[in-house]
Amino acid sequence: MAGQRVLLLAGFLLSEFLLSEAAKILTVSSLGGSHYLLLDRVSQILQDHGHNVTMLLYEGDYLVPTFKKKENEYQVISWLLPEDHEKELKKHFDFYMKEALHGREAFGTYVKLMEQLGIQCSDLLRRSDIMESLKNENFDLVFVEASDFCSFLVAERLGKRFVSFLPTQFGAVDLGLPNPVSYVPVFHSLLTDHMDFWDRVKNFLLFFDFFLRQWQIHSTYDNTIKEHFPEGSRPVLSHLLKKAELWFVNSDFALEFARPLLPNTIYVGSLMTRPVEPVPQEFENFISKFGDSGFVLVALGSMVSTYQSQEVLMEMNSAFARLSQGVIWKCQASKWPKDVKLAANVKIVDWLPQNDLLAHPRIRLFVSHGGMNSVMEAIQHGVPMVGIPVLGDQPENMVRVEAKKLGVSVQLKQIKAETFALKMKEVMEDKRYKSAAVAASIIRRSHPLTSAQRLVGWIDHILQTGGAAHLKPYALQQPWHEQYLLDVILFLLMVTLGTLWLCRKLLGIMGRWLCGARKLKKA
């Protein structure tokens, strides 16, 4: 018995030693906006946990010019594009955003933008000062982001193990997960997991379209790979995605449809949610004016706020004027039309404490662009939503919000004051939306571990075990025709057809022999 206690104590002390040993971790952030916010949060959590974290940060302002980065406790290595490349990238991004906000989010425009990101990646990999500095650091692990393919190539150039963060819900990229198309909707299908016959036909056809589009997107990095990796050892992006030790997914069972997962796939939705603090007095004073009627929070994300048209602002302002609630609206004052009078019940601000306002007892509704971070914060605090999705994963997120009865969706190009006001009143007055939001909040909060605890726990696990090979099925190494048993099906089909052909031949021979025997007998 005493010996067992000694062994248990030794095991405990060893685990404490392993957990206390700091690892050197590199996080890579090239896209800015909410993508940077997520990687910043990840970096800070890992730094607080005792690891030595360095972020490789692109500091260009092509994505959201007004976005301000804060001081960090972890180390930051920053870099910039040459001025001409930065201008070209910004031009393509601005065009893509304007097209998307007018309901013209063409796939070809997105591919053009991705080509520019491939050029941006080449500029980074060409920076021998940065790449050599990173190699000399000898990191234990690299933390990459699924929307930023360049981060995968950085990890590959450094020859280091990496884990990946998926900022959207499943389907945006192929992680190698099982995808039964009978109930797992393909990305951009706008379907739920409850599909009738024609939905399943649509989902099946879009399954092939998805892989064709992925191939086109990945091909935008072909020149970058050819330039920076020697022939014979050039990585394939689709293979790199499946090479990740772990996949952290910015979603939760409270929102996502139930589906098959692999052991190395971990939900960390609401990672951005922080402890609630009292809202600043200026907001509290405004909220108190409306008493029990409460208030509506409006935050359409950095990109939509930057690029939205004046016509949309006017229609939204007119819709808010029809509500009895106060409206706190994150909207740049510089973008406000000078000839439009702001509704009396509306307060516009350049910045607001979104998490704290969502936790306020008098909030009645959250009007959002449907970005994953915002949706997860609303679920965390049990607030029903009206979503105005524009691009990327936002329409898919709102499909899930509507399927779970957490709110409704409105198309940006179809916003009219009267119908928009009716939608908001519907969600606030129909108690079923609030009940569903509270139920989703209970699901989200009832996890035995927080998102941050799951993140650091799994990172520590693979650092101690030397990787996650034990969590990844062999299927990730199989070619697609083996994984889907197409070679087996083809073999069995050939055997079946060959057997039928042989039986037919034998029956023919026997038939002719019998006919010949009868003729001889008659003769």
Image (cartoon, rainbow, N blue to C red):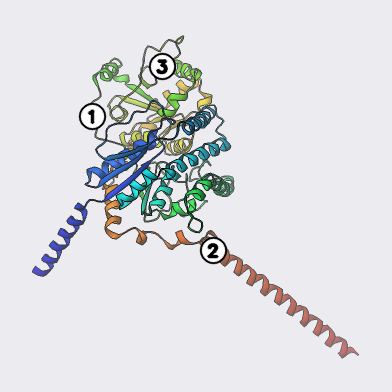
Identity, as a three-letter code, of the amino acid under mark 2:
Leu
Tell me which numbered mark, 1 or 3, is placed earlier along the sequence.
1
Residue 97 in view, yes or no: yes
Q: Quadrant of residue 75?
A: top left
Q: Position of residue 160 (x, y in %)?
A: 36, 54
x and y percent of residue 175 in the render? 45, 51
Does the residue at mark 3 contact the one at mark 2 (Cβ under 8 Å)? no
Q: Residue at x 47, y 16 (%)?
A: 314
- Disc 2 marks which residue? 485
Report the front residue among 12 and 195: 12
Please identify, in this view, whether the residue under mark 1 or under mark 3 is nearer the observer.
3
In the displayed structure, would residue 20 be above or below residue 78?
below
Q: Earlier in the sequence, mark 3 or mark 2?
A: 3
Q: Which mark is residue 277?
A: 1
Cα distance between the residues tagged 1 and 2: 54 Å
252 shown above or below 96? below
Residue visible at 37% across and 56% down? 263
Looking at this view, is 484 or 446 the one in front?
484
**Residue holding disc 3:** 334
Circle on res. 515: none
Residue 1 in sight from this viewpoint = no
The reply, left or right, for residue 395 in relation to residue 376 is right
Q: Are marks 1 and 3 in contact (CB under 8 Å)?
A: no
**Quadrant of residue 289 in the image?**
top left
Left or right: 28 as drawn, with respect to 502: left
Q: Residue furthest right?
A: 523
Horizontal and vertical percent for residue 48?
Answer: 22, 43
Q: As shown in the figure, which amino acid type bears the numbered disc 1?
A: Glu
